[in-house]
Amino acid sequence: MPQSLMAFLAMLLASIIDRSNANTQLILLDGEQTVIGGLYSTEESYTRRGIPFLKDLPKWFFGLRYVFGRSQTATTQKELVIALQATVIDPVRSRARNQLVNESLVSQRAAVQRALEAFNKDIANKNAKPKTYKGTGK
C-alpha cells in the first residue's frame, strides 16, 4: 500500500476518533466566568507532493523519486482552551410559580390598558362638546 494512501487513511481515522477530555470541579456564582486550559495535543502529518507516478517511484530507482517529488513532515501543536460562564437555573417549581406571576401581570396590564383606553375616549368626548360661557351681560 503506498505511503500517501496510508497517510490519508491515518488522517481520516484521526479526524473521526479525535477526542479531548477535561475534568475539573469549580465553584462559581451566577454570571462568573472561568477558563480551563492546558489541553495540549501534537499532530504529525506526512505529505508527499510532486508529479504523479514519478514521485512514487521506489527509492532505489535511480533516485528519480527525489527529482520529481518532495516529502514534508509537519508537526502541529495545539492547545485547547475552554471558557465557561455559570448561569444558575431556577428549579422547575420556581419557574412554574414565576410563570403564574407573569401571566397575572400580563392580565393586570391588559386590564389597565383597557381602562386607560376607555378614559382617553371619555376625555375625547368631553373635549368634542362645544364650550359654553356664561358671562355677565352688560
Image: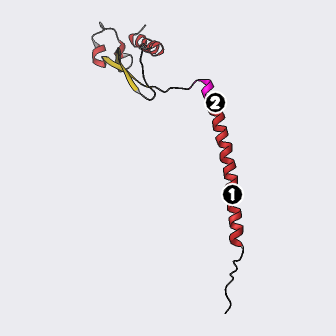
Residue topped by disc 1: 117
Dominant secondary structure (helix, strand or loop) of the stretch shown in magenta: helix
The three-letter amino acid code for the residue at tag 2 is Arg
Percent position of residue 39, x then y? 36, 16
Locate residue 20: give its quadrant: top left
Relative to 30, say whether 102 is above or below: below
Q: How is the image coloured?
A: secondary structure
Relative to 121, say whether 132 is above or below: below
Quick one: SS at disc 2?
helix
Tally the numbered discs: 2
Q: Which residues are magenta?
A: 90-95
Relative to 129, say whether 82 is above or below: above
Inspect this view and state whether residue 49 appears: no
* Residue under the point 70% across and 69% down: 126
Locate residue 44: give its quadrant: top left
Q: Which mark is residue 97?
A: 2
Inspect this view and state whether residue 86 appears: yes
Badge 2 local density, few (<14 within 10 Å), some, or many (20+)?
Answer: few
* Residue under the point 67% across and 85% down: 135
